[in-house]
Structure formats: structure tokens, C-alpha cells
Amino acid sequence: MGAKFSEFGADVGEAIVVRETPLALLVKLVDHNNREAWVPKSAIHDDSEVYEDGTEGILILEPWLAKKLELV
């Protein structure tokens, strides 16, 4: 499943936060075979449902990061 691009960023699908550091989140990307990836907090869009430890839902990233992580 590829990311959906819009003016809001890249919707990469369902994700669950596994771990949090001051600068990044380790997320499990449910819609990408439960692959785990570190995501800088600065690259998470304001409309994302996933943004800190204990959150899960639709992860919206900056398009450049979705491409770099090969989620598109």
C-alpha cells in the first residue's frame, strides 16, 4: 500500500508508537507488514494521529521522508 499525498503531507497508513526519544519515534507501520522505522518528530505532520508515545492511528509524514523510507 503506497502513501497518499495531499496538501496535508503523505498518509502512510496505520502506525503504532513502539518507543519514543526526545527527537524521534520508533513506529510499527501496520499497513507495511508491521515494518518498524525511526521517524524524526520534526517530519511528522501536525494532522497526524501518531505523534508521541501511546498514540496509534494514521501516520502523516512529510513527503520527502515517506519517499526516503520507501513508503511510497
Image (tube, rainbow, N blue to C red):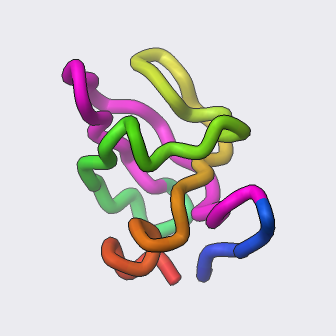
Residue 60 higher or lower than 18, as above or below: below
Most extreme residue toward the right, as rendered? 7
Instruction: Please state which of residues 45 and 15 is positioned toward the viewer in this rendering.
Output: 45
**Measured along the vertical axis of the image, is residue 42 above or below residue 30?**
above
| Residue lying at 25% horizontally and 48% vertically, measured from the top left | 38
The answer to which quarter of the image holds residue 67 is: bottom left
**Image coords of residue 4 (percent x, y):** 71, 74
Give the position of the N terminus as an image quadrant: bottom right
Q: Where's residue 42, x and y in %?
A: 40, 40
Q: Is residue 16 above or below residue 54?
A: below
Left or right of 60, for residue 70:
left
Q: Nearer the viewer, residue 32 or 49?
A: 49
State the predominant SS element of the stretch in magenta: strand
Q: Residue 29's quadrant in the figure?
A: bottom left
x and y, in percent, of residue 41 in the image: 38, 36
Provide the residue span drawn in magenta.
8-29
Q: In the figure, is residue 1 to the left or right of 34?
A: right
Q: Residue at x 57, y 31 (%)?
A: 56
Task: Write the residue at 53% across / 70% down.
Answer: 63
Number of numbered tags placed on the structure image = 0
The answer to whether 21 is drawn above or below residue 57 in the figure is above
Position of 67 with respect to 49 (left or right) is left
23 or 55, nearer to the observer: 23
Q: Is 6 covered by the magenta stretch?
A: no
